[in-house]
Amino acid sequence: MTKIRVSFIIAILLLLSSSFFLQVARCQSESDSEDAELVAETVEEGADLGIVGDDVQDFGSGNYSPAPGVETVCVFPKNAAKTVVAGKETEVLVGMKNDGDQIVKVLAVHSSVHLPYDHRMLVQNLSAQVFNNASIPPSVQAAFPYIFAVSKFLQAGTFDLVGTIVYEIDQLPYQNTFYNGTIEVIEAGGLVSVETVFLVSLGISLLVFLGLWVRGQIQNLSKKTKKAPKVETGTRTVDASMDEWLEGTAYTQSKASKSKKKK
């Protein structure tokens, strides 16, 4: 019974921890929805999104600092879980706000994939998306689409994505990191995510622990309702074998003397 109680307590703790993680995920999704609203407002304002160029330029080799007054956000449209299917394209909307006094000329957006526990371990350099004639006047917001695809041979798991937008102000290069966080890479055709496996496993564990607890309660109840066995009393009969064993003893002698007196 003690093991069942311990298992039930563990199940309650797992349930509480899962609710905490779900609350964190909910808060993160709310944050993503706010960023999405900001990007949507930017698109509705009709800012100049520029034209995607076909030329390939190595924008990832530079290490520039961000310009003061320039802020960036990003959102994964209809993909709050930030799930990336290996070998397939994933879209990101990069929002940029110019609070400075000069025009910002956007050059390109690029990103890279790293191991989550060590950013020095580069997994893959993703393609750069170049913009021509993309400028943001002062006090204006703009949104830029960025489409990338990780290698189809990349093993499923959690990786870190670092996204950077490169721009110029007065012919001086700058860059902002619009995203530096985790993504969940899954294989093509994989419909089961880590969260789904965790929730299903937690649900099965809770059902098992609940069944064990109910079974223990039923057993305890059945033990209490059982009545004590009745002890029957009555005349004691002496077996013939017992008489033979008692022959020659004081018991048989006294019995014989009593019979003679009666005669």
Image (spheres, rainbow, N blue to C red):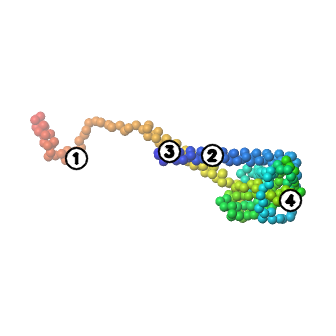
**First reached walking from the N terminus: tag 1 or tag 3:** 3
**First reached walking from the N terminus: tag 2 or tag 4:** 2
Question: Given this view, does label 1 or label 4 mark the residue nearer the observer?
Answer: 4
User: Which residue is the site of mark 4?
Assistant: 171
Per the model, the C-alpha gap separating discs 1 and 3 is 55 Å
* Residue 242 placement (x, y as % from top left): 22, 45
* Residue 25 placement (x, y as % from top left): 68, 48
Q: Name the residue type under label 2.
A: Phe
* Residue 192 placement (x, y as % from top left): 68, 54
The answer to whether residue 51 is seen in the rendering is no
Per the model, the C-alpha gap separating discs 2 and 3 is 23 Å
Residue positioned 50% across, 46% down in the render: 6
Q: Name the residue type under label 3.
A: Arg
User: Which residue is the site of mark 1?
Assistant: 241
User: Which residue is the site of mark 3?
Assistant: 5
**Circle 2 SS class:** helix
Image height of 235 relative to 7, above or below: above
Question: Given this view, does label 2 or label 3 mark the residue nearer the observer?
Answer: 2
Per the model, the C-alpha gap separating discs 1 and 2 is 78 Å
User: Which residue is the site of mark 2?
Assistant: 20
* Disc 4 and disc 3 in contact, CB within 8 angstroms: no
Left or right placement of residue 248 versus residue 204 in this view: left
